[in-house]
Image (cartoon, rainbow, N blue to C red):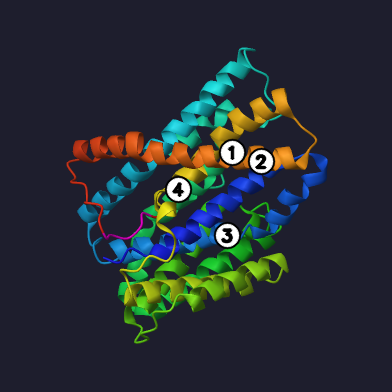
Amino acid sequence: MTRYRLFEIWRLVAALLIMLYHFGHFAPEASLWVKDELSVLRPLLDMFFIMSGFLIFDRYGEEVRDARSYLVYLGKRLARLYPLHLATLSYFVLVGLAVHFGLLRSGGEPQLFQWDTLPAQILLIQAWGVQDTLTFNFVSWSLSAEWFAYLLLPLIILAHRIGGRFGLAVLLLLSYAALEAMVRTGVMPFESWVQADTWGAYRTFADFVLGAFLATLVKSSPWRIASRTSAWLAILLACATMVLRLDIYVTLALLGAAVFLGGLVERNDPDRYTYPAFLRPAAAVSFGIYLWHPVTESLLLSFVWNQYIASPSSAVFFAYTGFVMLVTVFVAIASLRLFESVLAGTILKALGLTRAARSSGSAAPI
């Protein structure tokens, strides 16, 4: 099974940029530009979702055929995602309790600790339109959104089995049309579905369908190109459209082209790494970097930086931010090896499922 190493490095770069964007909110006034400049890269989240849809359909599109195989698939996805979600959620619950009992100050973000939203967090439905604000581990909305798409994988498979690529294309058009209708009617309370987070499940499903559609194109394409240049060019052009604030569908088209070309060249030349060996441990934990960085932000920026450093120097801030980002990467690597993998194995064993050996299999989608 193809590993899709290009997707690994793209997801790592995107996770690092998202982390830098969030950390940029703590910058001194002279350097607040960093968060403003990076805010235009919001559609990189859609790239995450498109690649996840590609990988999930590539891995499970033919395997999920009945109720039992569907439950096995969900069990495997839950074992992969839930341990880290539970760990990071637990951290913010503990912080929230400390704030509630006056042991800690809220750090100006009391909205994170809304206890009536905790059941939605535990059930991973916080991005389904059931709450108005992001709470606890605020980035976990994307995990909730992915879980929604995982649950609806049979609908994507059914569209493909009935109509092939045409069936997926119809579902794709209907999904984005539904997003536009939800925004224009006010059902989704955002100016654009690209901004959706508490309603991000529906945005993610549409991106998943696009990823599945691209996976079918890659599988059947007769093109034998193996150069990564075209894929990198497409992703850079997509980022340029974000910076220029062009129409989101122009960006989506280029992101789709990048994922298609990336998948194609990896299919044609699956054994070649496209990034340095020292980045491989980090590239394997982009999901962990994404979920852990609000924790390190809370500890090392919201607390340590704000309380003890708070330097007006941009040089000091960026040096310290680089240190925190590096710490986050090492935390994510340790978490995968010492916690997530162990607990995932325990869950799979309890469910009576065997764990697939990690070798040349496709990268686990976040």
Label 4 packing within 10 angstroms: few (<14), some (14-19), many (20+): many
Of badges 3 and 1, the one in the foreground is: 1
List the residue tagged with mark 1. 323
Asked whether disc 3 touches disc 1, contact meaning CB atoms under 8 Å apart, the reply is no
Sequence-earlier tag: 4 or 2: 4
Sequence-earlier tag: 1 or 4: 4
Secondary structure type for disc 2: helix
Asked whether disc 2 touches disc 1, contact meaning CB atoms under 8 Å apart, the reply is yes
List the residue tagged with mark 2. 319
Say which residue appears at 54% left-offset and 33% top-offset: 295
The magenta region covers 360-364
Asked whether disc 3 touches disc 4, contact meaning CB atoms under 8 Å apart, the reply is no
Say which residue appears at 40% left-offset and 68% top-offset: 212
Residue 276's place in the image compared with 231, above or below, is: above
Residue farthest along the right direction in this orientation: 30
Q: Amino acid at mark 3?
A: Leu
List the residue tagged with mark 3. 44
- Left or right of residue 322, residue 57 in this image: left
Instruction: Assess whether residue 361 is covered by the magenta stretch.
Output: yes
Label 2 packing within 10 angstroms: few (<14), some (14-19), many (20+): few
Q: Amino acid at mark 2?
A: Ala
Q: How far apart in space, not on screen, are marks 1 and 4 (Cα)?
A: 19 Å
